[in-house]
Amino acid sequence: MKHLFLTFLFLLAVVVSTNAQEDYKDKDLKKYFENTEFYSVVDLPQNAKFKKKPKNIILLIGDGMGVAQVFSAITANKGTINMSQMPHVGFSQTQSADNYITDSGAGGTALATGQRTYNGAIGVDVNKKTIPTILEISEKNGLATGLVSTSAITHATPASFISHVPDRNLYEDIAADFLKVEIDVFIGGGKDFFTQRKDGRNLVDELKQKNYQVYNSVEESKGVESGLLAILTSEKHNEVYPNRGNMLPEATQKAIQVLQNNKKGFFLMVEGSMIDWGGHANNTEYIVQESLDFDRAVGKALEFAASNKETLVIVTADHETGGMAIEGGSMTEGKVNANYTTGGHTAIMVPVFAYGAGADNFAGIYNNTEVFAKMKSLFGF
């Protein structure tokens, strides 16, 4: 009887831990938002001459970001954002292998591997077999690699680029996969999955043994400009914007600073995770604040690409969340009024913005798997 009771407690703890990673899906309907924090966008040079093929690729994923989310940010920032400066625009169709509406696991895996899979999968195909990701392929070809996320770094989208598990909720297994690939930089939450583990391993200690410099914030890593770098910014997920401050733009800039030391080039994926969470909550303020913060990170990537001339910046989403519809607003005042059709994901196409070397390859309408195919081809792998 005691054995059964202990088993029950263990299973309850697992369920609670898993649910704690998904509690952003609670609804908090807010239709209206008025912005008070405006910013200037990057002044991109006109008629800039870029290399035909990139040495570096920065892929930024606004999780849950459809056209309405983008336009709400444009409206809130008085008519312009960094994304709207990017001259090449296409659309990605996001369906998964087993569902008309994808989840972030399958959506992230499609972008990372070029294959559609079942909802909930991370880096595996429909038969649960491992598929190499663009990050792993880049690393094997001598490029530096990085991941940045406002969520736990073990959450579905960043996990899809470095891990191979049959279920997105296997956070500790995903964390262990970071020790299997020599990723140069990763920044995000989820420290507990590295240190407070059921198997007793302390992955932070193991990272240090592999010569990673490990910190708890971007600010702590201020003097670091090279080498292997892991920054675990919170025990689980980071706080929402503005409570977390400028973590995402600063983390993006830090990752670029370190990765650019590799003479062969680099691949970096940056996720603005919580646009999706605002969509699940049907909360306009949440969505717009997160979209604007994500766009400021986009600005850091664009600044680098504009000066570097060998970098491709791609901005897209894994899917749209909330069925967001903008019902009113004011660009002169930064006001947005929106409504929602669902608390879940939708099947609509999502935008793909591109700037820099090889950006003209991203116009048109295509499956999400083509983002991987285009990146791989432009890298020459």
Image (cartoon, rainbow, N blue to C red):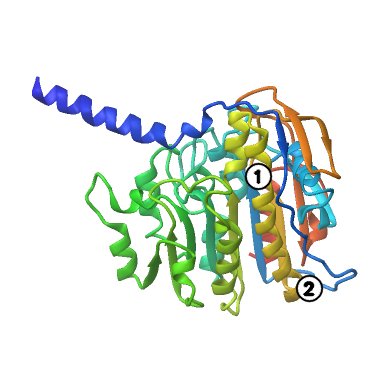
Q: Position of residue 231 (x, y in %)?
A: 44, 62
Residue 23 horizontal/vertical position (percent): 46, 32
Q: Residue at x 48, y 67 (%)?
A: 219
- Identified at 73% across, 32% down, the residue is 348
The residue lying toward the viewer, choosing from 231 and 293, is 293
State the mark number for residue 289: 1
Q: Position of residue 148 (x, y in %)?
A: 54, 57
> What separation in Å lies between label 2 and label 1 (alpha carbons)?
34 Å
What amino acid does circle 2 point to? Answer: Lys
Position of residue 14 relative to residue 309, above or below, is: above
Label total for image: 2
Q: Is residue 165 left or right of residue 55?
A: left
First in sequence, mark 2 or 1: give its number.
2
- 173 and 80: which is toward the camera: 80
Nearer the observer: mark 2 or 1; the answer is 1
Whether residue 380 is visible here, answered yes or no, is no
Q: Which residue is most to the left?
A: 2
Using the image, determine if residue 266 lies above or below residue 108: below
Q: Secondary structure at mark 2?
A: loop
Horizontal side, residue 158 vs residue 171: left or right: right
Instruction: Work out whether 332 lies above or below 265.
Output: above
Q: Quadrant of residue 351?
A: top right
Q: Is residue 194 above or below residue 57?
A: above
Q: Residue at x 42, y 52 (%)?
A: 234
The quarter in which the N terminus is drawn is top left
Q: Element at badge 1?
A: helix
Is residue 283 visible in this depiction of the protein? yes
Label 2 CA crowd tier, 10 Å (few <14, some 14–19, many 20+): some
Image quadrant of residue 357?
Answer: bottom right
User: Residue 51 bears which disc, if any?
Assistant: 2
Q: Residue 31: x, y in percent?
A: 70, 28
